[in-house]
């Protein structure tokens, strides 16, 4: 067991549609000896809407959270890939001194831009070997889906290879499962378009799930609530639109780590997904 | 046949360079961006055409295009550009320009969605799906849009009813106001 402390930024969706990500992340981190101290009174990072609308807003909103973490003096662990992307972009843009001064002025607070921002996937993958697994996920084939925001652009995210990242694959294999080799691990799922151009989300997400299924995946692992929602909540619609049975459970990587660390599917809130993973888990002897 | 001799850089080129640090004159039209664009199939101008149009200063055509709204910022183009141009960032700057110039967006719903999202964040400090959907429906004058998922979201506890009003909400609103004041000059 390790002993690490992070300031923690869950992000808005982990308070509503992605509660199971927050719950499973906290359980897993506790077991691994990672202390997550939630930032007090955190606000939204601006997500895709701020950077679509205004450059300055897209830096100033995440900068408020970077400043709060600076006050606590801890590296900032982020769960949502979108928030992670926005916080890393802001930190990158604030390396410019004039921008830093301008944004400090907007916040009305001293900002040094000294916060180190990390994603929970990095934190957990880095210390999974420090505790023994309760249960190996043998026989489980997982399509590790990174999406866009964790890996691109490399100069800003400094996360993993942009075309063929391996971090989640390594983690999943450490759990005893098999990470399948597939083409679409960094392809786009349709992002923030489900309310406005559902057709695009259905097409792009269906392409992903269809390939994962053809390659024999039992489930897809994700690290982003937006990807999760697109792949899970709209899966029935994809099946109707494209006349293909998918029934592919979409799980947060923290839920799979949690299973291997001995938590039950119930404790990991696996009953909250639209595509029920329980039949597949029972079939694999994991529930 | 007439010929176009590109000026060293159009005003639009300069705007893009100033706001994003990207020099679109480095683009030599290889088309890798368009080849890999997941939303390319619904765009009226592909990313490669957008780069060329910026070089030529075709501002009106660009701001009136669907493309600038359909770009989902997946950044595949930026990652693959052999000239190292952050094309997604360039695309973003065209949306900022459309906002400043108050151009009627060719994909109205997408622009309304972003406005609704920021409206919720400005008022409550955090985004919240139910409020966002309601706000979006109101602004897009379509009160019954997107309700098919609601029952499933409810039974799975995926909706919180209380807006998570942040104590520092005043602070968040102040950030919005100050940004607006600066952008208005």
Image (cartoon, coloured by chain):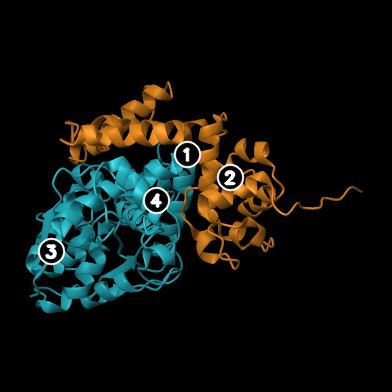
Chain colours: A cyan, B orange
Which residue is painted at 23% across and 62% down in the image? A120
Distance Cα–Cα, label 1 vs label 2: 10 Å
* Residue ID for mark 1: A197
Front in this rendered view, residue B165 or A275: B165
CB contact under 8 Å: marks 1 and 2? yes
Q: Nearer the viewer, residue A30 or B177?
A: B177
Please say whether residue A219 is visible from this viewpoint: yes
Discs 3 and 2 carry the same chain letter: no
Of the image marks 4 and 3, the number of the one nearer the N terminus: 3
Circle nearer the viewer, 1 or 4 = 4
| Quarter of the image where the N terminus of chain A is located | bottom left
Q: Chain of mark 2?
A: B
Residue B42's label in the rendered image is: 2
Q: Quadrant of the C terminus of chain A?
A: bottom left
Q: For the residues marked 3 and 2, what is the alpha-carbon distance in whole angstroms?
A: 41 Å
- Which of discs 4 and 3 lies nearer the camera? The answer is 4
Mark 2 burial class by Cα count in 10 Å: few <14, some 14-19, many 20+: few
Marking on residue A143 = none
Residue count near mark 1 (Cα–Cα under 10 Å), binned few <14, some 14–19, many ≥20: some
Q: Residue at x 50, y 64 (%)?
A: B79
In primary-sequence order, the first of circles 1 and 4 is: 4
């Amino acid at each position: 067991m390790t002993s690490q402390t992070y300031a923690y930024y869950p992000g808005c969706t982990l308070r509503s549609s992605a509660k199971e990500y927050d719950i499973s992340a906290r359980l897993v981190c506790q077991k691994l000896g990672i202390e997550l101290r939630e930032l007090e009174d955190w606000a939204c990072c601006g997500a895709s809407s701020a950077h679509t609308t205004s450059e300055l807003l897209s830096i100033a909103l995440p900068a408020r959270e970077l400043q709060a973490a600076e006050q606590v003096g801890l590296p900032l662990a982020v769960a949502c890939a979108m928030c992670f992307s926005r916080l890393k972009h802001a930190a990158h843009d604030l390396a410019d001194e004039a921008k830093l001064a301008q944004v400090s002025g907007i916040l009305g607070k001293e900002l040094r831009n000294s916060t180190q921002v990390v994603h929970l996937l990095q934190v957990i993958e880095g210390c999974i070997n420090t505790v023994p697994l309760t249960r190996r996920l043998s026989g489980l084939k997982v399509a590790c889906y990174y999406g866009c925001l964790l890996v691109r652009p490399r100069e800003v995210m400094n996360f993993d290879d942009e075309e063929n990242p391996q971090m989640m694959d390594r983690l999943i294999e450490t759990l005893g499962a098999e990470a399948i080799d597939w083409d679409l691990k960094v392809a786009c799922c349709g992002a923030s378009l489900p309310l406005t151009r559902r057709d695009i989300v259905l097409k792009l997400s269906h392409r992903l799930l269809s390939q994962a299924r053809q390659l024999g995946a039992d489930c897809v692992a994700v690290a982003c609530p937006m990807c999760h929602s697109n792949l899970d909540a709209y899966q029935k619609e994809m099946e109707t639109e494209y006349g293909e049975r998918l029934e592919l459970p979409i799980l947060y990587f923290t839920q799979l780590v949690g299973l291997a660390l001995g938590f039950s599917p119930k404790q990991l809130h696996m009953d909250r997904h639209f595509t029920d993973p329980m039949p597949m888990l029972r079939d694999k002897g994991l529930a | 046949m007439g010929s176009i001799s590109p000026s060293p850089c159009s005003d639009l080129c300069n705007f893009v360079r100033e706001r994003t640090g990207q020099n679109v004159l480095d683009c030599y039209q290889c088309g890798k961006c368009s080849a890999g664009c997941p939303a390319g199939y619904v765009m009226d101008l592909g990313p490669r055409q957008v780069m060329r149009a910026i070089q030529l200063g075709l501002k009106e055509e660009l701001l009136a295009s669907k493309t600038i709204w359909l770009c989902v910022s997946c950044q595949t183009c930026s990652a693959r550009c052999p000239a190292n141009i952050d094309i997604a960032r360039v695309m973003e700057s065209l949306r900022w320009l459309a906002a400043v110039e108050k151009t009627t967006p060719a994909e109205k719903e997408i622009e309304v969605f972003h406005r609704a999202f920021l409206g919720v964040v400005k008022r409550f400090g955090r985004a919240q799906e139910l409020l966002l959907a309601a706000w979006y429906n109101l602004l897009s004058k379509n009160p019954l849009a997107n309700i098919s998922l609601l029952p499933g979201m409810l039974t799975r506890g995926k909706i919180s009813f209380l807006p998570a009003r942040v104590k520092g909400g005043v602070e968040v609103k102040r950030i919005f106001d100050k940004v607006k004041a600066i952008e208005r000059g």
